[in-house]
Image: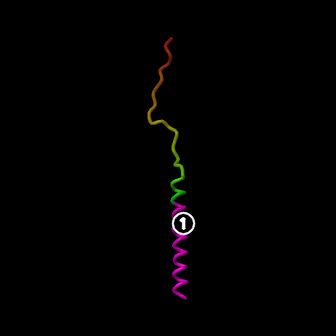
Amino acid sequence: MRRLIAALSTAVVAAALATGAAVGVVALLDATPDQPNTPLISYDTAPAAP
């Protein structure tokens, strides 16, 4: 009986750990990175000719 309880508790802990890891990975993949809104290339605009 003691081995059965140990096996069941190990399975429950392993399942909880796997579920927590899966939720963590999904949360990391769903996070949006901070992207600055600065252009890499900027062109100088000349004033309009009269």
Q: Position of residue 25 (x, y in %)?
A: 51, 59
Q: Amino acid at mark 1?
A: Thr
| Residue 48 falls within the magenta-colored stretch | no
Label 1: element kind: helix
Give above or below for 31 relative to 42.
below
Quarter of the figure that contains the N terminus: bottom right
The chief SS type of the magenta part is helix
| Residue 3 falls within the magenta-colored stretch | yes
Residue beneath the point at 53% across and 61% down? 24
Q: Residues within 10 Å of mark 1 (few under 14, many from 20)?
A: few
* Count of numbered badges drawn on the protein: 1
Q: Position of residue 32 (x, y in %)?
A: 53, 49
Residue beneath the point at 51% across and 54% down? 29
Residue farthest along the top direction in this orientation? 50
Q: Label 1: which residue?
A: 19
Which residues make up the magenta segment?
Answer: 1-24
